Image (cartoon, helix red, strand yellow):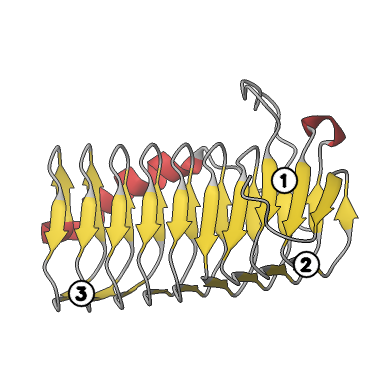
Amino acid sequence: MSCAKPRTWVPLLICAALLLAGCNARINAPIVVGDGETRSGSLTTVNGSVFVGKDCTIRGGCRSVNGEIEIGERSQVQQLATVNGSIRVASGATVDGDIESVNGDVTLEAEARLDGEIQTVNGSIRLDGARLERGIRTVQGSIRLAAGAVVKGDVVFERKIGSGGRSRPPRVELRQASVIEGDLVVENPDLGVRVVLRDGSKILGRIQNAEVEEVAEDDGV
């Protein structure tokens, strides 16, 4: 199993990218890409959000420190990274790289595809009919898969010193025939992760250090 990646470098990476991004960088301002546009290079902002419209092509990553990132339907982008903002990838969009967040939630909608992995510390992860070609790594973010979502790789809850403060244990819930094809591993057995499998959803690999409950039909909870 690979070692946990230190995530203190994420803000430094974003700030360094500002120095290199030229006209695609903003401070205290959002970046907005209109429907159908093509941009070369990364889009980077501090204290602002990044909004990419429908049917866009971004030949670079989208990064923000204190803002959200939204990718419109059927758009194509590379890596997505934020510290305190949420990340949302709309239906049919493709991300050719990783998605990284510290405190923000990550959502991938129907038929969205991620060719890398999702990494968070505290942010929750939701896949609604999306496909993740690799895996998920988080410290204490809850995970929800629905509408036939697929994770091809492992889901790992990393052991990290000083990661306390969550009011209740993380929850992993799979609904509507969703599948994790790899393992689900909780490196800290005291984290108290609970796994709920509904509507024929499955984890095909091993499950380590987590409580598992299987529900035959969706009871609406």
Q: Are marks 2 and 1 in contact (CB under 8 Å)?
A: no
In this view, the residue in front, 110 or 18, is 110
What residue is pinned by disc 2? 202
Answer with left or right where residue 45 lies relative to residue 192.
left
Q: Position of residue 65 (x, y in %)?
A: 32, 40
Location of residue 12 (image quadrant): top left
- In the image, is residue 117 above or below residue 165? below
Answer with left or right where residue 83 lies relative to residue 114.
left
Report the amino acid beneath label 1: Phe
In this view, the residue in front, 9 or 98, is 98
What residue is pinned by disc 1? 157
Nearest to N terminus: mark 2 or mark 1:
1
Nearest to N terminus: mark 3 or mark 2:
3
Location of residue 134 (image quadrant): bottom right
What residue is pinned by disc 3? 40
Residue at image position (68%, 37%) is 170
Q: Secondary structure at mark 3?
A: strand
Any part of residue 3 in sight: no
In this view, the residue in front, 8 or 86, is 86
Residue at image position (88%, 50%) is 208
**Which quadrant does the N terminus fall into?**
bottom right
Q: Residues within 10 Å of mark 1 (few under 14, many from 20)?
A: many
Between the C-alphas of marks 3 and 2, the distance is 40 Å
Q: Residues within 10 Å of mark 3 (few under 14, many from 20)?
A: few
Residue at image position (38%, 70%) is 78
Report the amino acid beneath label 3: Ser
Report the amino acid beneath label 2: Lys
